[in-house]
Image (spheres, rainbow, N blue to C red):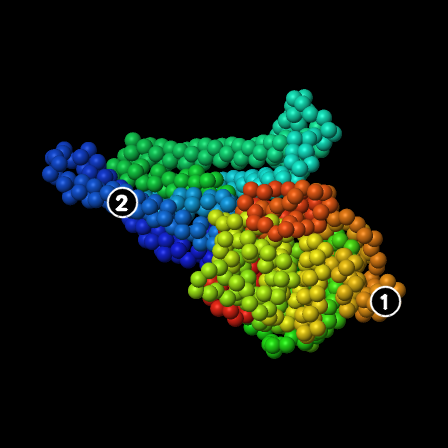
Amino acid sequence: MARPVDPRLWRYARSARPYLVVSVLLSLLTTGCIVVAAVALARVLAGVITDPGRRTLGAWAVELAVFAVAVGCRAAATWWQSRLAHRAGARVVAELEQAVLAAGADLPPRELDARRTELAVVVGNGLSGLRAYLAGYLPALLLAVLVPPIVLAVIAAHDLTAGAIILVTLPLIPVFMILIGLMTQGRAAATLAATTRLSDQLLDLFAGMPTLRALGRESATGTGDSGHAAASAARRASLEWSASGASGLSDRVAPPVGQWTQRDRVRALGESLHARTMSALRVAFLSSMVLEMLATLCVALVAVSIGMRLVFGNMGLYAGLLGLILAPEVYLPLRAVGERFHAAQDGMAAAARAFAVLEPAGKAGEPSECAGASRPAGAGGRDIGEAPGVIEIRNLTVRGRDGSAPGDLSAVLRPGSFTVLAGPNGCGKSTALQAILGLIAPDRGEVTVGGVPVPELGLERWWARVAWLPQRPVLLPGTLRENLELFGARPEAPASGPARVVGDLEAACAATGFDAVLDELPDGWDTLVGTGGVGLSLGQRQRLALTRVLAADRPVLLLDEPTAHLDDVAEAAVLAALTARARAGATVVVVAHRPTILAVADHVVEVHADATDSDMTPDRHGDSGSGARVADSGDMPDQHADYGSDAGTAAPRHDSADANPGPRRLRAAWGGSPNTPSTTDGKAGRRDADESPRVGSGNETGSDAAQDGGEGDRPRPLAGLPCDRETSSATGRHSTEGIREVVR
C-alpha cells in the first residue's frame, strides 16, 4: 500500500465500497457542523462582549440552538462513522483473508512452497491491522482532505491575514508526515518480516519435534554441551543480534553460536521481533510529539497575529474569534492522520503482501515471479477428446535456484505403456509430473498431449482425465467416501449395514490391501477421518490414495512413489494392478527408484539435472532434473535408446531435507491432512508403517516420519483452506476436484 488509499482494497473487498461512500458523506456532514458551530459561537461571544443590551439567553436563543444542533450532529456523525468503520473493518479483513486463502490454494506447488509462511502470517494476524486502518486512519484521512480547505476558505473570507498564515504553515505537517512515513514504512516491513521469520522457525520446530524427540535432540546443543552457561551465552548473543537489528541494520540470520539450543534460537527470533516492534513504537511516539508541537506552534502563530491586530484595532472581534475557533480545526485532522498512521502501518504492509498474492505477475498459463511457477488456466482451451493420446515431453527444462531440474528432458509416454521416471533425488522427476499436469510452466521446451501443448489445453478437462498420486497423499477431513470420490470412484451404499465395494473398486481395494482396513473401520466408507474422526497411519493413507487412483476410470495415471510405505506383498499387488491398467490402454507414468518397479516397467526414462547449471545441491522444491534415456525393461542395464539429449550426468546425492527434516515438513504440510497422525511399530528401516492395517487413535507418533525425512502427517501451517467437497461428492461423474485437492 504505497498510496494512502489503495484502489486494490476496494477491488478485492466489496464491503469497503459502501463504507467509503458513507464515510465521505459523514465527513462532509462533520465539516459543515464544524463551520456552523464555529460561526454560531463566534457570533454569540462577539455580541455579548460588544453589545451589553443583548446579554441574555433569550437574545441569543437561535444561535445557541444552532450551536447545540451542530455539536450534536457532529458527535452523532463521528459515532456513526466509528461504528461503521469497525464493522467494515471486520468484513474487509474477512473478505481479504478468504481471497488470499483461495488464491493460495490455486498457487502452483513451487510458488506455494516459497510463500507458505508468508501466507500463514498474512492470514493469521497480519491483516488484522487493517481494522485500525479502516476504523481510525481512513476516517481521519477523509477529514484531512475535506476539512482544511473548507475551513481555510471560511477563515480567509473573514481574515485574509490569518488565512495566509495558515496557508503557509499548513503544508509543513504533510511534509513532516511524509518524511516520518518514509522512515517508519521500512520499520513496519521489518517488523512483519521478523514475525514471518519467527513463525517460520516455530512451524519448522513444531513440525520436526517428533523427529527431534525420537532422536533425543529436542534440547541438544550444537556441540553436545548443555547447561546454564551455554544458555546464557546464547541469550547474550541473541540480545546483541536483536539490538543490531533495532539499530536499522539489514535483516540477517542470527550469527552461529555453537552452544545454541532450539529454545535459544526461538528466543533469539522472539527478541528480535520485540526489538523491532519497540523500535517502530519509539518512532511512532516521537513523530506524534513532533506533529503535535508543529500544529501547536502554527495555531499559536495565528493566535498571536490575531491578538496583536485586535489590540491595535485593526480587525473586528467577530472575525478574530472566528479565526481563533477555526484555526485548530484546520490542523486537527492532519494531526489525527499522523497519530493513526502508525497504527495502520502493520495492516498496510500485510495488505501489500496480500495483494502480491492476489495479483501475481503472471497470468493464466504464464510464468509468475516465483521460481518459474505458473497459474493454471481456466476451463477454456482446446479439447483433446476422451482419449488424450500420446504425451510427449520435448526438451523440458525447469530452472530453479540450484540449476535446471529437469534440464532438456525428452520422452514419449504412449497409451498402453507402463513408463517409469527414474533418477537421483532432486533430478526433476516430480517436477516433470507437475509439468505434465500443467501446474508449472517450463523455462524451455514443452509438454504436448495428443499434439496439443499443455498451456493450450482446457486444464479443467485435462485434469478430469488424469488420476494423480503425489508423494504425500491428500486426506481430506470428512468421510472415506468423500476422499474416494476425488477422482470419480463411488462405493455402493446399501440401505443398511456398512458400505461395501463392488467391481473395479473391489479389485483396487484388494490390490492395495485397503479392504482389510475397511473391515476394521466402524462405518466402512462412511467412517469419518481427520478432525473429529479416526486417525489413519501413514501406510493406511497410502493405501487409500492408491485405491482412489486405481479405482478411477481415467485414461492417464500419474503416480509419484506409489509403493512407499508398503510391504513387499502389497507392492507386488499394486504393480500388478498398474500393469493391468496399462495393458487395458491407460497411460501409466510412475516416479520410482526401486528395482522391483523398474523391472516391471515397459520403458524407463532416466532423468538428470543439468550439471552445467547446477552442482546438484539440494533443491528445496523437490525433485528436479534434466536429460532422459529410455530403455526397455528387459535390457535396461546395457541398451538405452535416446529420446533426447543427455545434458549431463549427476551423481546420486542425499536431499538436504533428509538431514534436516524441517523444510521438507513445511513443504509437505500442504498436501497432508490435519489431525491424522502417522503410526509405526518403531522398527528402524521398516518400509511399511502398518503391515497389518489398523485404525490409528489420533495420538500415535513413531519413527516413520523420521525415517522418511518427515513426510508423514504434520500440522498444516496454513489451515482452513477452502475445500469444495460438494462437487466431488454430489455425483459420480469425472471432476477436477481431485487434482485441485491434491494440488492443495
The residue at the point 21 percent across, 36 percent down is 45
Q: Nearer the viewer, residue 87 or 493?
A: 493
Q: Nearer the viewer, residue 291 or 171?
A: 291
Q: Earlier in the sequence, mark 2 or mark 1?
A: 2
Residue 603 in picture, x, y percent from top left? 78, 68
Q: Is residue 665 visible?
A: no
Cα–Cα gap, marks 2 and 1: 87 Å
> Split into 4 quadrants, where in the image is the C terminus?
bottom right
In the rendered view, would you say 496 is above or below 414? Answer: above
Extreme residue in the right direction: 638
Left or right of residue 632, residue 222 in this image: left
The residue at the point 74 percent across, 67 percent down is 419
Q: Nearer the viewer, residue 541 or 14?
A: 541
Q: Which residue has dot 2 on it?
A: 76
Residue 349 in picture, x, y percent from top left? 53, 46
Type of amino acid at the residue the image marks with label 1: Asp
Type of amino acid at the residue the image marks with label 2: Ala
In the rendered view, would you say 83 is above or below 597? Answer: above
The residue at the point 52 percent across, 71 percent down is 733
The residue at the point 32 percent across, 32 percent down is 307
- Quick one: SS at disc 1? helix
